Amino acid sequence: MKKIIIYIFLSLSGFFIASCDSWLDLEPQSSITVNSMWKNSNDVKAALNGTFNRFRSAFQTNYIVWGDYRTGFYTNGVDNGAVERGNVWNNQLIPSTIGTDWSSLYTSINDCNLILKHAPEISFADESEKSFIMGSTYFLRAFCYYYIVRLWGDAPVLIEGFESDNQEGLFPVRNPADEVFNQIEKDLSEAFKLISIKGGKSPLEISKEAVCMLQTDFYLWQAKVNKKGTETIDKADNALSYVLNSGFDISSSYEDIFRDDLNKEIIFSIAFIEAENTSSFAGDFLLGLTNVPSEYQNNPVQIGSHAQWVTISAIHKNLLWEKEEDTRAQINIDDFTIPSGKYFSWINKYLGTWKEGTRIFDSDIRIYRFAEALLFKAEIEIAKNNYAGALTYLNRIAKRAYGIDNFYKGTYTQQEIENILLDERLKELCSEGKSWFDLIRFGKVFERVETLRGRENELNILLWPVNNASINTNPAIIQTPGYD
């Protein structure tokens, strides 16, 4: 069982920041709660606890829904009951589909806004602690907005916290996407300045390296999707250089990254802890107890207490198992056929803990790890037409995967090396919430996603509709064009 290392990921017992459960449906706050908040540094620390708790809740199911399912790389598991998920991986989104509700992200943003409003007025015995809290808050707000703008495009930009139901601005409109991107850039700049902690102590706290990984991610999106110019590639490179020179390294074992939540390769994770909060999506991946004969349960077929709603599609499994020597394949998707001929397959990354006949889904979500830093660097070098340099970083990933030095060698065209890099990202980061955004960033989404072929001209097909509940609550919100 993982050790509980730092206070910021522990959920509160009975004390949460004063904010709304739904950012568009504010309930009147107790005068005792409002008046008793924001008196001393302990209030600010507790508020950050609550913010992390809500942040985790926002992503505990949707992280993989938003980041992976629209690729079509996933399909029904043996229980064949994931209808809503099927709408996502078939790209038949409607405003009630799973993942269309942005309220949890805006609730987290509101928590951040309140910390950034009140914390500067409060004295700390150690002012560096306040800087860390505020820097972490800027990072969390940027992270939420980065998801919002990539998923919905135009969206409300809220930087003032709501504390009651009679404040102005309770019915915001959707701001242009460029304004959302501008806010993200500002928040990340503030986060880097305020956070003094370097990585290596724990992936469960926000370090300068975590900020730089998000900055790199952000600037690559700006450069390649939003076509903001070569200067954004340089900004990505500058941010990434901090990570590459930080002392992080890749693990010698790919499997160990997913069996040890504190593996040295992990730069930033969202923590899940037994008896506090466990993953909502990991239970969908393993076989249910009743599906597997007892002699094969966890030997080798990994089982859980949930129905298996989701597994990886055959076409994607073929990519993951493309090279027999790839040590990542069995961790990404394992399978087994019992003597009766019944076939099982399961995603093997988020096993959690088997305890007293029950599966505890307490595996952390790996948000950024050093392997992705190497892949980002390869992407940057390709953008700078330095293909030889890109191969240097690609081959560090390939060495662990295939056990061969200089696995990629020779001369490649830009298209060839970009396809190699994309394939390596899809294999290395499988089921880690990256593939949908990668396919868009590499310009391959309409080529590689079967259900999107020939749909390039459909308005906003790569964006998501806004959930009906948000529109019904706030008449100022206009549905994403193409879904109205």
Image: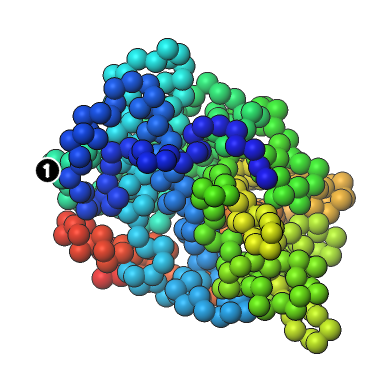
Count of numbered circles on the image: 1
Identity of the residue furthest to the top in this view? 125
Identify which residue, 61 or 329, lies in the foreground: 61
Compare residues 297 and 412 and report the one nearer the observer: 297
Tell me the crowding category of disc 1: few under 14, some 14 to 19, or many 20 or more residues within 10 angstroms, Cα based. few
Which residue lies at the image location 16% right of the left edge and 59% below the top edge?
A: 475
Secondary structure of the residue carrying numbered label 1: loop
Q: How is the image coloured?
A: rainbow
- Point out residue 410 in the picture as x, y percentages from the top left corner: 81, 51
Observer able to see residue 315: no
For this view, does 146 lie left or right of residue 162? right
**Which residue is farthest bottom?**
340
Amino acid at dot 1: Asn
In the rendering, at what x and y percent does residue 471 appear? 23, 62
Viewer can see residue 199: yes
Quadrant into which the C terminus falls? bottom left
**What residue sits 41% from the left and 67% below the top?**
98
Rendering quarter of residue 266 = top right
Q: Quadrant of the N terminus?
A: top right
- The answer to whether 354 is drawn above or below residue 276 in the figure is below
Left or right: 141 as drawn, with respect to 252 = left
Give the x, y percent position of residue 269.
Answer: 57, 43
What residue is disc 1 on?
166
Q: Nearer the viewer, residue 168 or 28?
A: 28
Q: Position of residue 417 (x, y in %)?
A: 69, 54
